[in-house]
Image (tube, rainbow, N blue to C red):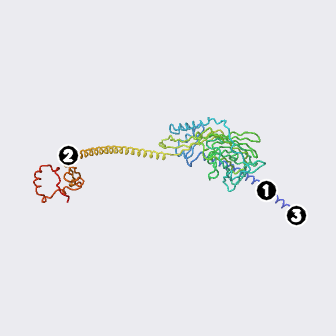
């Protein structure tokens, strides 16, 4: 019996130890779950910060300036401090950026803001009728045909299935890989000359941890390219950032963000409109009838003239999309009204930076009604110098061309004058030759001309009196028609003496056949 009692006591002690270890294991498990939730929240915050960084810092190491809604400097990046230490004083005193830039430069920003402000007063509430272009999904639709799955994972997590008699697009959670998934309509809707409205319902997961972004994408990529579909258009995010926010993004960067949280296992009605460059989202809880705050953006740098697919996205969460209706209509606006370039070059009012030029990039973000501005400074001094050198070289070349053209014009004029004078001289010579020929042909004397070598070039017709044709003499030399002295015929010597006073050029060739 003592041994049995001892064994029972040892067993009781062992059971107590095991229960303690189980309690510790449960505590550790709870701590791990809490740590996991904290890590996930941190992960979502990092995603949000990364997207904001993408928006505010489009270029790595580009100096940036942060301003409040009144354009007072409230902060800056470290590399801007290295560029100019005066910015620290501006930020500490919340001084207006007007004093930071060169005189007159802030007016360029004001002119831009006035153009953007005009967009807010456009008549967006027009009564034009919407035309239904799509209603679904339908049982016959297939992923890979009517819908294109763009995956960042190896597994396709989308399906089209019937649930309680309703055909739905369903995204199955893949929480372990934490990747974005996209499903894009193969057909395009709502081009640059059209407005578009999408009405649809969403059903959230029963597990609140699986509510991870139920987004609509418009003006999206086709899903066939390697680029993420939302990086060419707009995302209207519902239940984003770990079900803490709603936002409108352009090219993957948040432009407007509000706090928002969706309830688990709940149906919502979502209506998204893009009228011109104005995007608006309405969200209604179908169980309570409660409307969420309206989400709205007027984009002054519109991108709905690229691709125009429509689709849905989820960040590895569980989601259902159904009762989808897509409407379009001809827009009363031109996309050019919503393309206002922020192409501003400025200088910084500091002695050390005189002669330096910067091109600004503007970021605007509205968070719960608070407007923040960010200006990024791209140093374009070398670019401007290169442009100036190119301009001077072009001007010098143009001047040289003008000078050479003027010289050529003078030379051309001189050539024309010389050609005209030559023509006149030639005409005068021809006229003189004509007169000389007429005179020669009508005189009784024999007229001829010879070259320096004594070759006849002309003989007047009077030579025929001596039995010759001018043609048979021309081309022969004078010597061919003169008898040698020792061969002079008798009786001719006296004749020569009698005619020795006659002029030499009028002498008649002796009657003699050519040698």
Disc 2 versus disc 3: distance between alpha carbons? 176 Å
Q: Nearer the viewer, residue 498 or 269?
A: 498
Q: Element under label 1? A: helix
Q: Is there any visible trace of residue 74 in the rendered image?
A: no
Residue where numbered disc 1 is placed: 22
Q: Element under label 3? A: helix
Going from the N terminus, do you reach mark 1 or mark 3 first? 3
The answer to whether 311 appears left or right of 421 in the picture is right
Q: Nearer the viewer, mark 1 or mark 3?
A: 1
Q: Element under label 2? A: loop
The answer to whether 342 appears left or right of 237 in the picture is left
Pointer 1: residues within 10 angstroms few (<14), some, or many (20+)? few
The numbered dot on residue 443 is 2
Q: Residue at x 64, y 51 (%)?
A: 223
Residue 199 placement (x, y as % from top left)? 70, 43
Disc 1 versus disc 3: distance between alpha carbons? 27 Å
Pointer 2: residues within 10 angstroms few (<14), some, or many (20+)? few
Pointer 3: residues within 10 angstroms few (<14), some, or many (20+)? few
Q: Quadrant of the N terminus?
A: bottom right
Q: Nearer the viewer, residue 442 or 249?
A: 442
Q: Quadrant of the C terminus?
A: bottom left
Residue 291 placement (x, y as % from top left)? 72, 39
Q: Nearer the viewer, residue 487 or 232?
A: 487
Q: Nearer the viewer, residue 454 or 363?
A: 454
The numbered dot on residue 4 is 3
Going from the N terminus, do you reach mark 2 or mark 3 first? 3
Q: Residue at x 71, y 40 (%)?
A: 292
């Amino acid at each position: 019996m003592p041994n049995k009692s001892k064994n029972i006591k040892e067993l009781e002690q062992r059971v107590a130890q095991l229960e303690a270890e189980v309690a510790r294991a449960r505590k550790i498990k709870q701590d791990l779950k809490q740590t996991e939730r904290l890590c996930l929240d941190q992960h979502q915050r990092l995603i949000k910060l990364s997207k904001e960084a993408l928006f505010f810092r489009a270029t790595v190491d580009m100096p940036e300036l942060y301003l409040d809604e009144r354009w007072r400097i409230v902060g800056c990046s470290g590399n801007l401090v290295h560029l100019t230490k005066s910015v620290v004083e501006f930020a500490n005193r919340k001084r207006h950026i007007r004093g930071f830039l060169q005189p007159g430069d802030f007016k360029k920003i004001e002119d831009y803001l006035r153009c953007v402000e005009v967009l807010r007063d456009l008549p967006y509430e027009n009564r034009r009728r919407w035309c239904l272009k799509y209603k679904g999904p339908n049982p016959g639709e297939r992923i890979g045909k009517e819908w294109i799955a763009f995956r960042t994972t190896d597994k396709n997590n989308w399906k089209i299935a019937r649930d309680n008699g309703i055909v739905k697009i369903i995204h199955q959670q893949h929480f372990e890989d934490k990747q974005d998934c996209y499903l894009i309509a193969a057909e395009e809707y709502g081009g640059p000359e059209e407005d578009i409205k999408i009405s649809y319902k969403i059903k959230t997961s029963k597990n609140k941890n699986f509510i991870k972004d139920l987004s609509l994408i418009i003006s999206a990529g086709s899903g066939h390219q390697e680029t993420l579909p939302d990086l060419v258009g707009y995302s209207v995010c519902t239940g984003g950032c770990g079900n803490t926010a709603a936002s409108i993004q352009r090219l993957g960067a948040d432009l407007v963000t509000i706090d928002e949280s969706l309830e688990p296992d709940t149906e919502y009605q979502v209506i998204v409109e893009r009228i011109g460059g104005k995007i608006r989202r309405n969200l209604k809880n179908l169980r309570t009838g409660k409307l969420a705050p309206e989400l709205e953006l007027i984009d002054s740098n519109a991108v709905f003239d690229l691709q125009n697919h429509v689709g849905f996205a989820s960040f590895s969460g569980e989601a259902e999309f159904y009762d989808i209706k897509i409407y379009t209509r001809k827009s009363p606006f031109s996309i050019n009204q919503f393309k206002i370039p922020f192409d501003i070059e400025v200088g910084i009012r500091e002695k050390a930076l005189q002669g330096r030029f910067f091109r600004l990039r503007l970021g605007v973000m509205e968070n719960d009604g608070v407007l923040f501005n960010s200006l990024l400074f791209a140093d374009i001094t070398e670019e401007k110098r290169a442009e100036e050198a190119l301009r001077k070289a072009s001007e010098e070349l143009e001047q040289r061309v003008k000078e050479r053209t003027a010289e050529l014009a003078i030379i051309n004029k001189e050539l024309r004058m010389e050609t005209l004078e030559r023509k006149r001289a030639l005409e005068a010579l021809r006229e003189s030759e004509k007169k000389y020929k007429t005179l020669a042909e009508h005189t009784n004397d024999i007229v001829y001309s010879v070259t320096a070598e004594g070759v006849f070039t002309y003989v007047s017709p009077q030579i025929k009196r001596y039995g010759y044709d001018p043609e048979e003499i021309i081309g022969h030399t004078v010597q061919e028609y003169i008898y040698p002295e020792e061969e002079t015929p008798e009786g001719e010597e006296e004749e020569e003496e009698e005619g020795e006073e006659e002029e030499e050029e009028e002498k008649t060739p002796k009657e003699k056949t050519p040698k």
